[in-house]
Image: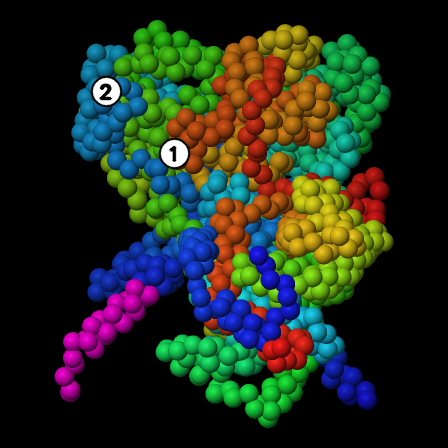
Amino acid sequence: MGKLTDKLKQYLKPGYYDKFDYHWTMTIDLDRCTGCEACVVACQAENNLPIVGEKRFRERREIKWLRVERYWEGEYPDVKLRFIPMLCQHCDQAPCETPCPVAATYHNQDGLNTQIYNRCIGTRTCAVYCPYEVRYFNWFSYTWDEPLEQQLNPDVTVREKGVMEKCTFCIQRIRQAKDRAKDDGRRRVRDGEVTPACVQSCPAEAMVFGDLNDPESRVAKLAKNARGYKVLEELNTAPSIVYLKKVNPDG
Amino acid sequence: MADYREPAYADVNRDILQTMLVTGPRYWIVFGITSTVALVCFFLPWIYQWHVGVGAAGMNRNAVWGTYLSNFIFWIGLSHSGTLLSAVLHITGSGWRKAIYRSAEAMTLFSLMTAALFVMVHLGRVWFVHWSIPIPNPMGLWPNFRSPLLFDVMAITTYLVASSIFIYMGSVPDYAAVRDASTGLRRRLYAIFSFGWRGTAQEWHTLGWAYTFFAVFVIPLAVSVHSIVSWDFAMSLVPGLHQTIFAPYFVCGAIYSGTAGIVTVMYLLRRCLNLERYIREIHLDNLGKLLIALSLVWSYINILELFTGWYSGTSYEYEALRFKLFGFYAPLYWEMITFCALVPLLIFWKKIRLSWNRMFVISILINIGMLTERFIIVATSQPRKFLPAAFGFYFPSVVEIMITIGSFAVFATLFLIFIKWTPCVSIYEVKETLKPLRRAA
Amino acid sequence: MEKINRRDFLKFIGAGGIGAGAGLLYGESTRKTVELLIPQVVTPEDYSPGIATWYNTVCRLCSAGCGISVRTREGRAKKIEGNPNHPVNQGRLCALGQAGLNALYNPDRIRTPLRRTGDRGNFAPIDWDEALTLLGRRLGNLKIKKQGSSVYLLAGGLRGHIDTLFYTFMQALGSDHYLHYEFTHPAALYAANRMIFNQDILPYYDISNASYVLSFGADYLGTWLSPVHYSQAYGHLRQGRTDQRGKCVQIEPRMSLTGASADEWIACRPGSEGLLAMAMVHVIVNDGLYRGPDRNAWLEATGPYTPEAVAAQADVAADVITRLAHEFIRNQPGLAIGGGSAASHTNAAASLAAINVLNYLAGNLNTPGGVIFNPDPVSPASPVARQASYARLQEWIEAMAGGGVDVLITHAVNPVFTLPPAAGFTEALAKVPMVVSLSSFMDETTALADLVLPAHTYLEAWGDDMPEPGVGFPVATLSQPVVKPLYDTRDAGDIILSLAHQIGGELPVVLPWTRIEDYLKDSWKHIYGQRRITADSGGNFDEFWNAALAAGVWGENITREPLRFDGVAEDRIRALQVPPPAFAGEEKDHPFVLLPYLTQAFHDGRGANLPWLQELPDPLTSIVYGAWVEINPATAKRFGIREGDIVEVQTPSGSLRAPAFLYPAIRPDVIAMPIGQGHSQYGRYARGRGANPLEILSPLVDEASGALAWSATRAGIRKTGERAPLIKTDGVTRTLGRQILDDKPAHT
C-alpha cells in the first residue's frame, strides 16, 4: 500500500522531473532596489523586446518582461513608496504550465519555466492563469525602424504575432554557460558564471542569480535570509524568486 | 387566417414539407441579408485580424481573453437547448417536445459550429490549431492532456459528433417523407440521405432503440461539456473565477440560455413558416415553466457567488466582487441581473406565459442577459487579479463587436440552410401526438 | 504520357492557382522576409561570425563617466554592459546607459554634413571636403584679420583629451571663448566647495561606507553626479555589511527616486534646505556635539538660524530639525549632501555651503564614509575654468546678440532646449552669421545651424575621460569605437584636426596630428611618462596602451596622502549666511512653486530620442511617452482636477499645458514637472511630445555661483477643461492588504 501511495504521490508534482540538474533561483533584495529600472532596459536590449509604440502603450499592450511595480503607503506627509520588480517567478508549481493545450510552456530540468515560441498557438490561457501577470502576448508583429534592428541579439528569437512570451532568466546565457562548462571538461556551471541581463545591470546589486542546488552559491545563502519571502506565497505556486523584504527601521 | 384545427396526417406532411420544398422570395431576401452580414461582419473582420494579429481585438496585457471567449461560451451554452429538449425530455417520455425538438437539435448543432469558429477566431496562430488534436506530427508531440482547453477540444468534438449523429438519425424517416414528396435530383439525394427507408416495423423498432441509446449517451455529454468549458476559468487562480460552483453555474446557465433560445426560434419558425398548428400554447407553457425553474436556479447560484465572495474575507475576492458590482461594468452586471433574474419572474403569470409576443421578448432579454453574463465573467475578473499594480481595463474593439454580431448572422444562415434541407418539425413524431387516423366521415 | 485534354489542363491550372493563392495568403500571414548570408569568400577581418567581440569604452550619456563593455556580433553592437574593471560603476549600468544603442542605431541620426539652404531649418547635404573648406576658410580669414576671438565654441560637459584638443585649437585661433555648458552642471556645488573646503573639484562622497546619509534634495540614486556608483554604494550601505545598516534621510519638497528609498522623507519648503542645514549646524554647535576651536564663530554665524526660527520658514518641526542634527552627528561616518531643489534656488551656493559645513562639523573630511577629495586627479583634470554657469553664459548671449560673435560652434550641447527662452539664447543665435553644430542628431540647436558637421556617436569615437567626481583616486577611462562608423560622420576630434590643417598657419604646427587616435595616443605617452606608469610586462608604452584599451580603464588605487585641509577661515565662517529664497512671481497670482526635476531616463532631455527610454515607465509615476504636471492630491481635489485633466501652468515668463497627475508625495503648495519632453526637434521619438518646463522658467540666478535658479519660478494652474488621459502602466498603486511586499499581509 505504501509503495502504491508513493507511486501516486509522484503524480502530485506537476512536471516532468524528479529532481533538477540545476535549480536556477533569483533573490531580489528590496532593501537595495532603488527602482531605477536599469534592469528593465537591460532586459529589453538583451531579449529583443519590441518597441511597441505610444499607441500600443495606450491600449495597454506593452511588452516588458520585467516591470517595476510601485506601491504607495500612507498619506502625505507620512507617505512611503515601495518598489518591487516583478518578472516571471519560474514557479515550481506553475499555474501556467498545466493549461497550455499544446504544451508550449513547461518546466525544464533546470527549474525554469520555459516558453517554446514555435509551439505556441496563442490561446493565451497561460496569461490568464498567471497570478503575477508576467506573461506578455504579441498582439501584432512588431517592427523596428531601420537601423534599430541591427541591435537585435542573434541568440534570441524575434517573436511573431500570436505568440506568448515572458522572462526566460536569459536562458540563452544559461545555455552558453552550460556549453562552456561542458567544453571546459564537463564540469558544473560555477556560481557567478551566468547572470541574466537584469542582474548584471542592477546598479545597487539588488538582484542575485544562481543555482539553489549549489549550497555554496550566493543565492542559496541569500534565499535562507530571515527577510526572505515569496510574493503571493499562499497561492502555493512555489516561485523560484525569493524577495528580501525592505527593512523598516522603526519596526 | 391561421388554422388551429388539429391537423390530419396528410396535413402534417403537406404543411411541413411545404416549408422545405416551397421557397418564396422572402426566404431569399432574408438569406441574402444574413449571409451578407455573416460575410461582412464575421469573416472579413476575421481575415483582417488574421493578417494584422489578434491586436485587432480589444484585449490587452491585463485581459487577454475577451469577447471571443465569452461568445464561445455563450454559443456552447445555447447548444444545450437541443440536448435537453431532445434527449432528456425523450427519456422522460414527454409528448410536448415532439414538435420542437428537431429545430432545437439543429440549434445545438449550429451553436456548436459557431462556437468552434470562435475558438479559431480567438487563437493567436490559428493556422496551427491542428496541434491541439492528437494526430501524428513531425514534432512527435502529444498535446497537453492536463489542459482544460484540451478537455474542451475532446468534449466539444464528441458533443458535435454525437449531436450530428443524433439529429441525422432522428431525421431519417423525414428524409424518406421528403423523398416521397419530391422528384428529380432531390428525390435521388434524399433517397441517399434516408438510406432507403421504407417504414417497416423492423426499421421503426431499430430507430426507436438507437435513438433512445443516443439520447442517453448525449445527456451526460451536455453536462460534461459545459462543466469542462467552465473549468477553463475555474481551474485558474483568478479571484472570482476559481470557484467550484462554476461547473453547475455554467451548465445551469447553458440550459437556461438554450431554452430561451428555443423560445426565440420557435416564435420565428411559427411566425414565418406558418406552423401555428404544430407549435402551440402547450409548448410555450412548458418552455415557460422550464425557464422559470432555471431562472430561479440561476439566481440562486448568483447569490451563492456573492456570498462566497463576501465570506472568503480575502482582499482578492472582495476586489473582484466590488469591481463586478460597482466598477466600470456595473451597469452591465445589473442589467444581467434584471434580464436573467427579475424579468423571467413575470413568467409566473399565465397571461404572460401564454402570450407569444411577450415570451419572445422575454426570451431575447434572457439571452442578452446571458451574453452579458459571459462577458462580465471575462471582462471583470481578469483586470482584477492579484497584483494591484497590474490592474487594468478591457473594452471590446470594433472588430470584436462586428464579429459578435456576425456570429448571430452565421448561426442564422446555417439555420436557414437547415430548414431547407431537413424538415424543421419532426413529421413522424408530430403524427404520434395526433389522434389516430379516421376514415373521412 | 497520355495526352491531357483541355478540360483537365484548365483544372490543373485552377488547382495550381488556388494553391498558389493559398500559399500566398499563408506566406503573407507568416511574413517571412528574404535574408542574406555573409559571403565567406571574402572573410571579414574584424569579426568572426558567431563569436562575440567585446570592446571597452566610456559611456558619455551623462557626466558620471561609467565604463562600459559593448558586446558586438558581426560588427554590430548588440548589448552594452558595465565594465567590471571600472571603479566608478564596477560592471553595473543605469537605464540611460543601457539605451545607448538606441543612440548609435537611431533612425534619425544625421548621416552626412548638411548646409543650410534658405530659412533656418532647411538643409541640403554636402560632402566633407566642401564643408570643411567652407568653415576652414572662414575661420582662417578671421584668424588672419586677428579676429579669432569672434569664434566661440560651446561644448557639453567634455572631459579628457578631446577637451584639451578643443582648447588648444581655440587658443591657436586666438580665441578665449571656449566654454562648457550643461544644464546639470553643479555650479552651486563647486562654489560651495570653494567657499568651505577651498577646493575646485568635486569630492567623492563615500556613501558605501557611511552610516548615515542626510540628503537635502540630492537625487543620488537617479541623476545626481554619479548615480550608478552611488546606487551601488547605497546597496552596500544598506545590506553590504553584517554589522550595520545605514540610514538615509531625504529632505526635499517633492519625493525624488532617492526619496522613495529613504527611511525618512521630509517635505520642506522649496529653497529652505540651506536654512535647515544652518539650523542643524546651530543645533550641533549649540548642543555641544562639536567641540572644535572655531565653535564660537560657528555659533555666532548661525545665531539667527535656530530650529524654532527656521521651522516656520521651512515648514519642518523644530524637534525634527533637532533630532536629525543629533542623529547625523551621532551616526558617523555620515554624509550631508545637497542637490536637486537645494541646488536650484537663488540661495543655492549658500545652501550647499551650509550643508558642507555639516560635513565639516562631523569631521568626515577625507575619511572613509565621508567627503573625499581626490588628491591626485589624472591630468587633464576637469577643466573647471571652462565650465560655465548660467550667468557666465549670459555674457556670451549678450555678445552674440551684440554681433560680437562671427562663428559659434556647438558640440554635444542643446542650449535652445535647456535654456529658458527668457535667457534670449535663440534670439541671440539668430544674430550669429555662422552657426556650426557638431551634433549627431537634429536637436533644437542644430536645427538653427548654418552648417552641420555630424560627429560620431560616442560608440564610434576615440577619446578618454577622467570621471569627476570619480571615486577619490585617479581614474581615466579610454574610449574606442566599438563598430565601424555607420554613416558619413567623423570623429569630433578628427573634425577639429582637419579644420586645423585646413586653416593653416600655426594651427597645423600646434596640432600636427591627422587622426584623433594618434593625438590620443601621444597625449597618453605624456601621462605615461609623467606618472611613471609601468605596465606589467615592464615599461613599454605600446603594451601599456594595448592593455589599457583592452581594459578600457586605467586607475591607481594606492594610498596617498589625503589633501590637507586647514579648516575654514574665520572670515568665511562669519560671512556664511543663507538668505531666504527669492522667487519670480507673487504668491497671490502664482500660488505654487514650479519644480522641474531631472528624471533618471532623460536627464536634461538628451534621452528623449531613445525609444527604449520613451517606453520606460517613469519609476515614480509609471507614465510613458509624455510629460505631466504633478499636483498634491488634496490640492487637486480643491481645484477639482482629476488625473488626465489638461492644466495650464502659468508663470511670469510663459505658460504651458500638460495633463495633471496626482502625486502623493509632493507639498500641497508645490507642483512639479519632469524635464526632458517637449522637444520640437530631435527625431521621431522625441518630437512633439509633452511639454518642456524649462520653457516657462524665469531667469533668476544664484548670485554666488551664477547658476540658474531653476526651482525659483512660481506658477499658477488653471483647468482648461480638456483631457488627455495619461499613458501609464500602473493599475492601483496600493497593496490592498495583499502579501506582496512582505511575508505577512498588512491586513486581511
Q: Amino acid at mark 2?
A: Gly
Residue C277 is situated, as x and y percent measured from the top left of the image, at 72, 20
Residue C532 is situated, as x and y percent measured from the top left of the image, at 44, 41
- Residue placed at 22% from the left, 71% from the top? C13
| Magenta-span inclusion, residue C14 | yes
* Callout 1: SS: loop
> Which region of the structure is painted magenta?
C1-23
Q: Decide which of tag 1 and tag 2 comes sooner along the chain.
A: 2
Q: Is residue C32 left or right of residue B80?
A: left
| Magenta-span inclusion, residue C611 | no
- Residue placed at 58% from the left, 64% from the top? B275
Q: Which residue is mark 1?
A: C683
Q: Is residue C707 visible?
A: no
Chain containing the residue with disc 1: C
Residue A60 is situated, as x and y percent measured from the top left of the image, at 55, 45
Residue sitting nearer the eye, C587 or C315: C587
Q: Which residue is mark 2?
A: C118
Instruction: Find out whether the residues at labels 1 and 2 contact each other: C-beta distance under 8 Å.
Output: no
Q: What is the quadrant of residue B7 in the picture?
A: bottom right
Q: Is residue C267 visible?
A: yes
